[in-house]
Image (tube, grey):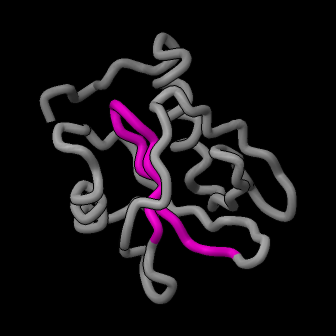
Amino acid sequence: MPVSASIRERCRTFLRPGEDIRYVFPVSSLGPPHTAPFLVVVTDLSVTLLSTSVFGRPEPSGVWATFPRRTRLGPIATREGPTIEFGGMAFEVDGEYAAVVAAADAEAFTPGDLPRDPLPDL
């Protein structure tokens, strides 16, 4: 399920002025010592890892780390579930967000592979 518009707007409050959100998806860090929920926010300028509240839906609560936009998120590896690694950490990502990870990487590293936006004025 896509991240809601209200969550995207809350994420925007933790970004630098003028950054344009491209992708947002939830992940869970893979210990040790514990798993923790995060939101990955990919903008035109950075990849920001936002910590979230532990209970309920993923509400952003602060910036955990910020990486350059050319940080590679994929490929998705399969351990006990789909995982990605960046910033020295491993994260479990729901399979429904695999296309989002691939699109974020394609936009940064092989933009010619992306299809043209069929509705650019929306």
Q: Position of residue 15 (x, y in %)?
A: 28, 50
* Quadrant hosting residue 81: bottom right
**Which region of the structure is painted magenta?**
35-51
Main SS, magenta region, reads strand
Q: Position of residue 61 (x, y in %)?
A: 37, 73
Which residue lies at the image location 49% right of the left edge and 40% below the top edge?
67
Which residue lies at the image location 46% right of the left edge and 46% below the top edge?
66
> How many numbered marks, from 0 up?
0
Give 8 or 12, whichever is nearer the viewer: 12
Give 94 or 91, whichever is nearer the viewer: 91
Whether 28 is among the magenta residues is no
Whether 49 is among the magenta residues is yes
Q: Position of residue 68 (x, y in %)?
A: 47, 32
* Quadrant hosting residue 43: top left
Residue lying at the far top of the rendered structure = 112
With 54 as the anchor, is 85 left or right in this view? right
